[in-house]
Image (cartoon, rainbow, N blue to C red):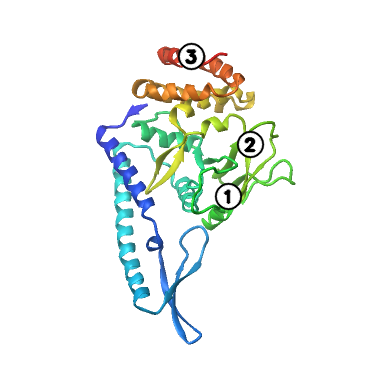
């Protein structure tokens, strides 16, 4: 890995703050569209028509044709100008980050991730995992990974139930993908009677997989995620990975604020998953170990406390997972001996 220049890290921090503020300020004024007046029962009323967002074209009632309604319409115009200026500044920061060596997400994947964010997937507890999360974590930690990171698999993980109350309780993930007009189609599973958990663009590598933790004695059958209007594939040990996500921008021509796993948990999860892969997936296992090693190297140098906290969380997992982690840590390269000893000293073998 290569360290990003301090100036680039400052730009990234500014981008993160701009995105956070922009997301918090999103309102009716941020929607692109037009006002239309209708006459109903002898009186004039104003409506707002928009095709912005994953729901497609929609119409909202604004109010009667009076002074307060006209004031609201004028405020919308001012808000649109301010929103456009904010988006322009975000795009400018992204261009500067690209020049400075920050890692970029490929344009098609970034478009899909932005569409899912607009649909509320991340606000409703979705966590971006996999290589796209690894790219985002590099920028978050102030480094550029030197390993090959080309992938168009977009993995979204989410718990079955969202425990935190939020204003919007549903996000139609399949409709959000369909609204992108990129040709996403559901990928049938081995059992045609089960709901699909993946969506793919025909003839391309672009794919979205929905995952959820496998808890208790749940089988490998797809599990419904009602708030997403979709089903997810349950995976063991995923609850540990997504228990304490952090916000991070996905950077391309623009930027999208998403949830990604805690970097230390991501590294330990990668180590264990690598050892669990079958012989047919040894290339993926090698990639997992390399990503874990690179993360541990950075965290051991800059944020050792994160590693300690991640191990403390791992100690609350089943004994079998702790033993697997010990075996996986033994595979770390020799140059990470000190980091391995730190992790093993905190790992409960009981």
Taking the image as shown, residue 149 lies to the left or right of residue 212, namely left
Q: Nearer the viewer, residue 168 or 102?
A: 168
- Residue at 50% x, 25% y is 313
The alpha-carbon separation of the residues under discs 1 and 2 comes to 16 Å
Of labels 1 and 2, the one closer to you: 1
* Residue at 49% over, 53% down: 167
Closer to the N terminus: mark 1 or mark 2? 1
- Outermost residue toward the bottom in this view: 42
Element type where label 1 sits in the image: helix
The residue pinned by badge 1 equals: 227
The foreground one among 75 and 113 is 75
Q: CA distance from mark 2 to mark 3?
A: 29 Å
Q: Position of residue 296 (x, y in %)?
A: 42, 22
Label 2 near label 1: C-beta < 8 Å?
no
**Location of residue 331 with respect to 93 vertically, above or below:** above
Q: What x and y, as percent, mark residue 104? A: 39, 40
Q: Which residue is mark 2?
A: 234
The spot of residue 117 in percent (x, y) is 47, 49
* Mark identifier at residue 344: 3
**Quarter occupied by the C terminus:** top right
Mark 2 neighbour density, 10 Å: few (under 14) some (14–19) many (20 or more): many
Q: Say which element carries label 3.
A: helix
Whether residue 300 can be seen here: yes
Corner quadrant of residue 17: top left
């Amino acid at each position: 890995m290569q360290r990003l220049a301090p100036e680039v890290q400052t730009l990234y921090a500014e981008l993160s703050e701009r995105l956070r503020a922009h997301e918090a300020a999103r309102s009716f004024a941020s929607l692109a569209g037009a006002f239309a007046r209708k006459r109903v029962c002898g009186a004039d009323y104003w409506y707002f028509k928009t095709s912005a967002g994953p729901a497609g074209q929609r119409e909202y009632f604004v109010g009667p044709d009076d002074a307060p309604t006209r004031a609201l319409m004028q405020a919308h115009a001012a808000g649109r100008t301010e929103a456009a200026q904010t988006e322009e500044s975000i795009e400018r920061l992204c261009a500067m980050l690209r020049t400075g060596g920050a890692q970029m997400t490929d344009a098609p994947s970034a478009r899909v991730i932005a569409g899912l964010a607009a649909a509320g997937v991340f606000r409703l507890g979705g966590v971006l995992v996999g290589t796209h999360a690894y790219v985002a974590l590099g920028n978050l930690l102030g480094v550029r990974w030197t390993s090959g990171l080309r992938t168009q698999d977009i993995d979204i993980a989410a718990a079955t139930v969202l425990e935190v109350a939020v204003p919007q309780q549903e996000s139609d993930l399949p409709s959000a993908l369909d609204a992108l007009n990129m040709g996403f189609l559901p990928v049938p599973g081995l059992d045609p009677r089960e709901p699909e958990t993946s969506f793919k663009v025909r003839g391309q590598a672009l794919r979205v997989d929905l995952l959820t933790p496998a808890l208790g004695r749940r089988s490998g059958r797809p599990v419904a995620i009602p708030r997403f209007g979709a089903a997810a594939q349950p995976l063991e040990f995923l609850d540990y990975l997504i228990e304490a996500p952090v916000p991070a921008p996905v950077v391309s021509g623009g930027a999208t604020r998403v949830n990604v796993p805690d970097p230390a948990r991501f590294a330990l999860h990668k180590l264990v998953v690598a050892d669990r892969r079958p012989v047919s997936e040894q290339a993926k296992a090698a990639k997992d170990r390399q990503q874990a090693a690179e993360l541990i190297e950075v965290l051991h140098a800059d944020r050792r406390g994160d590693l300690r906290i991640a191990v403390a969380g791992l100690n609350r997992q089943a004994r079998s997972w702790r033993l697997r982690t010990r075996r996986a840590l033994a595979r770390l390269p020799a140059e990470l001996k000190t980091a391995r000893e730190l992790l093993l000293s905190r790992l409960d073998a009981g």
